[in-house]
Amino acid sequence: MSFFKEFKEDLSQAVNELLPEEELLSSDTEIKNDDELLEDSDDSIDLDDFDNLLKAVSSTSEDEVKPEEENAVEEASVIEENVIEEESPELETVFAVEEPKAVAENNELSDESAVITRGTTIKGDIESTGSLEIVGTVTGNVSCSGKLTITGKVTGNSKASEIFADSAKIEGEVVSEGTVKVGVGSVIIGNVTATSAVIAGAINGNIDVNGPVIVDSSAVIMGDIKSRSVQINNGAVIEGFCSQSYSDVNVKAFFEEKN
């Protein structure tokens, strides 16, 4: 009898902890009724009431476990979402960066201009993407993409888009993609190649110009002249052969016999 009574008390305590307040009142009433039954019975306990009490406890525990499981599932899903959001790497923003263009490539004309002053002597080749003015002395080849002005002395070949020699001393080939102007007092020992030429100085070499050539009265030329057209002013001295091989006129056609 004492065993069932103690078990009854433990069971009622468990029910009080699990049941909400509203259900607790009803369960207390049932427990009191069960206690009265135990007190009235001296030698035995009503097994039917005991079974009913066990069923009530089991149903209550199941009702409590279900919401707890649902809450646990919801919390687990929230945690998984947070973990996925944390683990997902952020997209990196990539900006297209243009590569800096070269200031001046080879053989590209630049606005820069270099000057080799009087009293300066350079031994070696010179290359420039801009214009160049030589007042001093250069021993070596000179090449520039812009205009080449020579008033000093150059020992070596000269190449530029345009060449102007004024009181200059040049020993070497002179090649221009445009015009060559040889001023009074200039001396060139070497061949001259250009698309047009104005000569007022002295040249010891052949002149090959795919364009017009003007020989001024102060000019002295020792060499052949090959051009599209030639103008020789009074007083010029030419010792060589003149040919207009670049002319559009077929000279031989004028002297062929007609059948």
Image (cartoon, rainbow, N blue to C red):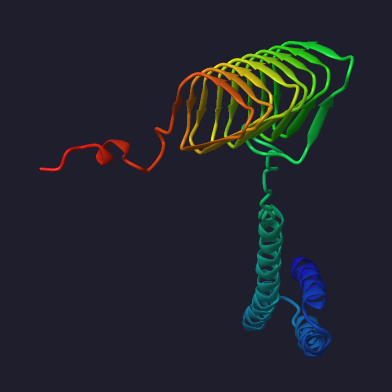
- Whether residue 128 is situated above or below residue 44 in the rendered picture: above
* Quarter of the N terminus within the rendering: bottom right
Q: Position of residue 219 (x, y in %)?
A: 65, 25
Q: How many numbered marks are there?
A: 0
Q: Residue at horizontal 66%, vertical 52%?
A: 96
Q: Quadrant of residue 76?
A: bottom right
Q: Position of residue 117 (x, y in %)?
A: 87, 22
- Whether residue 186 is situated above or below residue 195 in the rendered picture: above
Q: Position of residue 120 (x, y in %)?
A: 87, 15
Q: Is residue 63 left or right of residue 27?
A: left
* Quarter of the C terminus within the rendering: top left
- Comparing 115 with 86, the one in front is 115
Furthest toward the front, the residue is 234
Q: Quadrant of residue 106?
A: top right
Q: Position of residue 45 (x, y in %)?
A: 69, 78
Q: Is residue 25 left or right of residue 181?
A: right
- Whether residue 37 is situated above or below residue 196 in the rendered picture: below
- Whether residue 184 is situated above or below residue 204 in the rendered picture: below
Furthest toward the left, the residue is 259
Q: Quadrant of residue 138?
A: top right
- Comparing 210 with 224, the one in front is 224
